[in-house]
Image: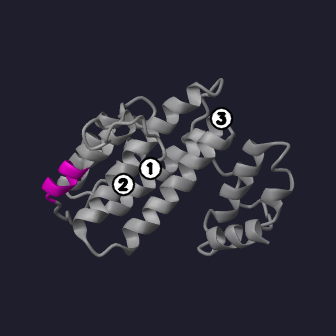
Amino acid sequence: MLKYDGESPAKKPQNADLPGLRNAEAAANLKTKSQPNPDPKSSWNLRAAARTDTEAALCDRATTLLSEGTPSRAIWSGLLLAGAELLMGQPGIVALHSLTSLNALRFAASTATDPFLRNLLMLQATSFVPLFRDAMKACGKVGDAKIDDLHPQRTDVAYQAVTAFKGLSKDKAKAATIALTYISGNPTGAMELTDAACG
């Protein structure tokens, strides 16, 4: 927003502007429909594609899913999973902002009343994931941690919500496992974890 080299950005868009211009056109032409039984794996498939797709390819994928009847919440879930996986691969400010940006765009889309704006915000969020992923490479090594490699422990192991945060700085993978174990079969577990994180 602050970049200015003496020429009107309306005459010469910056590289960072190009996804938005393309996404605005896609959002205007997007025809969504609802399926009675959308594929429950669509979120995980989108997350997997976010590991290698270019931002244009990932947006095309999301647009296709929406036009085939995949609910928007499944797209958002896939994007948030991808953002979380980026943070697992390189804990730092760039990956962190992949999640803060996704969360802000998701909130804006959930409160927007204009269908075009909702679609545009979702496609912009979709573009951001590969852009953040590529920006992370310039910051240093990016690990190959995969969010679907995390699994809960035995469900008979009892934890409190705060237990997941006690050893977080020492062993993030163990903390994630404890968190997954806590929410397994616990309908209020996610909210309790959130409350514990804020407390």
- Residue in view at x 25 percent, y 71 percent: 114
Disc 2 is placed on an element classified as helix
Above or below residue 27? Residue 196 is below
Please give left or right for residue 90 compared with residue 48 in the image.
right
The residues colored magenta run 24-31
Q: Are marks 3 and 1 in contact (CB under 8 Å)?
A: no
Residue that label 3 marks = 90
- Residue in view at x 85 percent, y 43 percent: 170
x, y percentage for residue 128?
43, 44
Q: Which mark is residue 199?
A: none
Please give left or right for residue 92 compared with residue 95 in the image.
right
- Residue in view at x 44 percent, y 56 percent: 77
Q: Is residue 41 visible?
A: no
Crowd class of label 1 (few under 14; some 14 to 19; many from 20; radius 10 Å): many
For residue 49, what is the image quadrant?
top left
Q: CA distance from mark 2 to mark 3?
A: 23 Å
For residue 70, what is the image quadrant?
bottom left
Please give left or right for residue 23 compared with residue 92 in the image.
left
Disc 3 is placed on an element classified as loop
Please give left or right for residue 79 compared with residue 39 in the image.
right
Above or below residue 196? Residue 101 is above
Residue that label 2 marks = 75
Q: Are marks 2 and 1 in contact (CB under 8 Å)?
A: yes
The C terminus - image quarter: bottom right
Q: CA distance from mark 2 to mark 1?
A: 6 Å
Q: Nearer the viewer, residue 119 or 79?
A: 119
Q: Earlier in the sequence, mark 3 or mark 1?
A: 1
Dominant secondary structure, magenta: helix
Q: Magenta span has 123?
A: no
Q: Which mark is residue 79?
A: 1
For residue 113, what is the image quadrant?
bottom left
